[in-house]
Every structure is written in C-alpha cells, then in structure tokens.
C-alpha cells in the first residue's frame, strides 16, 4: 500500500515537520517550487537529507498545489513509499538534441522496460517545443503506457524555469519519471471548459508555433478584431482568449495559448504547434464551465480504490490568471470527486502534457490535467 506525507517550505520557517522514521523508506519525492532559494544546491541537499534513498523530481511553478491549497513563493513536497512498485528518473539537456521530438523519444526509450505503466514528464517551460516533445514520447512508448506531465513555470514572469531530477534545480533540461509494477494503475483526465465563439477558420500560413495568416488574412489583425477593447493589452490579454486547433472536423481539438505578438509581421506565437491547414477557432472565458470541466477531469481520472493513491494536477498559468481565487474551487471539486484517499499535489504550468480523445500524449494549454496513480 502506498504511504505518503506532504510538507511545505517557506523562507521564514524552512521545511515543516517530516516523519524521520519513515524518511529512509521513501522512494519518490515530487517537489514543486516558486522561490529563488529553491535554485540553490544547498536547498536541494537539505531535502535530500530527509529522504536519502528517494528519487527527487519536480519543477518550478506558477503556483504550487498541496491538497486543495494553491500557494506562491514557497515549495511543496510529496514523499511517497511505494511498496509494490518501482520508479526510475532520467533526464537530458535540451541543447544536446537537434529537436524536442528526438529528445522525447530518447527519454521514452531510456525508460521503456517490462512493467512500465506510466511516464510523468517534467520539462523546462521556455526552451522546448512541447508539441514535439510529446510526439517523441508517443512515438516510442506503446499503447497502454499512459503519459502525462507539464512544462515548468516561472510565476507570471516568463523569465527562467527549473527542473529537479535527482540533483539541484537546473535550467534547460527535461526529466521523465517512470512508474513500474504489475499492480500499478494510472488513469488520466484532461478537460478545459472554454466557450467557442466566431466561425471556425483555416490556418493558411504557419511555421511550427508561429501563426501568420488565417483564411489568408493577417492573423494578428483578425485576432484583434475579435478582442475589441482587450486588444490594447496584448499579449497578456491573450490568456483570456486562447485558440482551439484541430486537424479536421472529426478530430479532437487542442487549446493553444498566446505567448507573443509581432506587429511587423502581424504574426502570433503560441505555446504549441499551430499546423498549417488545420482548423482554428477563438475561445472565451466561462467561469462556471471552467470549474465544471475540472470536475470532469477528476471523473475521468477516478480510481475506485479504498486505499491511498497519488493524484498529480497540472493546470495552466493562464487558467489560474482567469479564474483567480476560484482556482481553489477547482481543487475542492477534485477532492470531492476523487475522495479522501486521494493524495493531491501538482503545479500551475506553461503547458500540460496528456492524452485526450484519440490522441496519444499531446501538449495542451488552459486545461486541468490530472493523473491518478495507484499501486
């Protein structure tokens, strides 16, 4: 049976109490953080001293999740004792690979072994094409091995993101944690809840995640017409108006968040690929629907178990900015849906990685993505 404890760090008081007797038995610690001190090797070494035999993995965030509470400028850690399962962690530098798809494939192959049931991806949030990274993992990992994760955050600063993978925090790396075991089960859910508006249009010119024209019209000009008074606050106001993208009318759409605009080329840069020839439609905020869809993600990831299981929540910084304090209502619905045996942790990200619909692992934005892991 899975055993766990959750602790919190703050600059003023350090780490909260932990179970010293159980510490050496912990074999996995997931840590999410948003404070400059957490980048210091000494900070990591202190955490490692609590759990000397554990794999420690995590990312910087745009909000840390511990149970139903979201916090900033601190760190949260969930320490696990997996009694019937194994874990492995591998990581590579982004700069060592020609593209993110090759990197993702290399990480997937390094973890692939008999008994692999789930892969959790913890990636740098700014130096990676998340769409390519997801394709790499999906290409090498067989059906039946679930894949989830997210891109590290940096609050709303978008400056530097960090990944922890068995050592102190580093920039420009991608880590993957593999969960192994005959009895291990992993079940995920990924939902958004944004309302579509305006007609569905065709992406007529794009390169990777840069969109130039829609229906042969300059993309930024068209986008501004829909935003009206919000256009003057671009690119930040773009978090309130993401875009859905799908290959054809029969495909499941994915959501893309705006990162930057270029007035000269009238182009828009998104957090993931916006392929030429795909269909696109603008989305707008519906608070009730966003919260309702968090509950749908919980239903989709629900395990009917009467002993503790891990729940990792990865949601988008843009979603948090739109919902504000209502974000904790999302977590309360997740708790209510999954029950008291769920050990909930997670982070707000620059992109979520999950399977959805007919797709293997894909980059998403503006979703609530959950995975429940039970041994």
Image (spheres, helix red, strand yellow):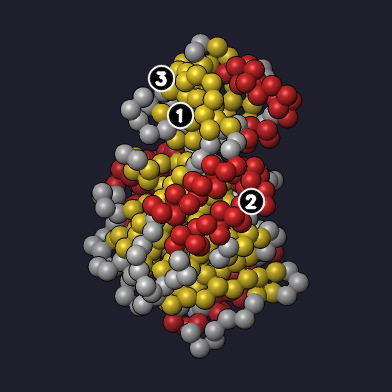
Left or right: residue 317 versus residue 78 is right
Q: Residue furthest bottom?
A: 21
Q: Secondary structure at mark 1?
A: strand
Q: Residue at x 51, y 40 (%)?
A: 193
Q: CA distance from mark 2 to mark 3?
A: 37 Å
Front-most of residues 22 and 316: 316
- In this rendering, which labeled residue sits more in front, label 1 or label 3? 1
- The C terminus: image quadrant: bottom left
Q: Residue at x 36, y 62 (%)?
A: 303
Specify whether residue 123 is in view. Answer: no
Q: Which mark is drawn over residue 277?
A: 3
Q: Residue at x 68, y 58 (%)?
A: 72
Mark 2 and mark 3 lie on one chain; the one further toward the N terminus is 3
Q: What's the distance in space between the residues labelled 1 and 3, CA to CA?
A: 10 Å
Mark nearer the N terminus (1 vs 3): 1
The tag on residue 245 is: 1
Position of residue 170 relative to residue 95, above or below, is: below
Whole-percent x and y of residue 83?
35, 78
- The residue positioned 67% from the left and 64% from the top of the image is 74
What is the spatial separation of the Cα atoms under label 1 and label 2, in whole angstroms?
26 Å
* Sooner in the amino-acid sequence: mark 1 or mark 2: 1
- Residue with the mark numbered 2: 326
């Amino acid at each position: 049976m899975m055993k766990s404890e959750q602790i919190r760090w703050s600059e003023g008081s350090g780490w909260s109490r932990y179970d010293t007797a159980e510490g050496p038995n912990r074999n996995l610690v997931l840590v999410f953080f948003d404070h400059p001190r957490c980048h210091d090797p000494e900070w990591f070494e202190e955490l490692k001293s609590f759990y000397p035999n554990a794999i420690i993995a995590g990312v910087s965030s745009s909000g840390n999740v511990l149970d139903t509470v979201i916090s900033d400028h601190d760190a949260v850690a969930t320490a696990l004792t997996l009694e019937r399962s194994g874990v492995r962690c591998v990581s590579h530098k982004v700069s060592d690979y020609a593209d993110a798809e090759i990197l993702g494939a290399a990480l997937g192959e390094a973890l692939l072994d008999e008994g692999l049931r789930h892969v959790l991806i913890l990636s740098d949030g700014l130096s990676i094409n998340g769409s390519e990274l997801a394709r790499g993992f999906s290409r090498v990992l067989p059906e039946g091995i679930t894949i989830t994760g997210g891109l590290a955050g940096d609050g709303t600063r978008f400056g530097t993101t960090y990944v922890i993978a068995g050592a102190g925090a580093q920039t420009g790396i991608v880590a993957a944690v593999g969960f192994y075991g005959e009895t291990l089960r992993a079940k995920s859910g990924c939902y958004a809840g944004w309302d579509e508006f305006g007609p569905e249009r065709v992406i007529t010119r794009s390169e990777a995640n840069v969109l130039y024209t829609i229906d042969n019209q300059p993309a930024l000009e068209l986008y501004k017409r829909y935003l009206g008074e919000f256009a003057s606050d671009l690119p930040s106001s773009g978090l309130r108006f993401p875009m859905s993208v799908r290959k054809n009318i029969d495909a499941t759409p994915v959501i893309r968040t705006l990162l930057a605009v270029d007035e000269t080329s009238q182009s828009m840069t998104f957090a993931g690929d916006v392929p030429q020839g795909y269909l696109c439609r603008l989305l707008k905020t519906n608070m009730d629907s966003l919260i309702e869809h968090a509950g749908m993600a919980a239903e989709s990831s629900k395990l009917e178990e009467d002993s503790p299981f891990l729940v990792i929540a990865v949601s988008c910084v843009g979603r948090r900015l739109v919902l504000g304090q209502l974000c904790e209502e999302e977590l309360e619905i997740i708790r209510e849906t999954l029950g008291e045996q769920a050990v909930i942790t997670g982070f707000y990200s620059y992109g979520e990685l999950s399977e959805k619909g007919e797709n293997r692992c894909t980059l998403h934005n503006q979703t609530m993505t959950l995975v429940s892991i039970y041994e």
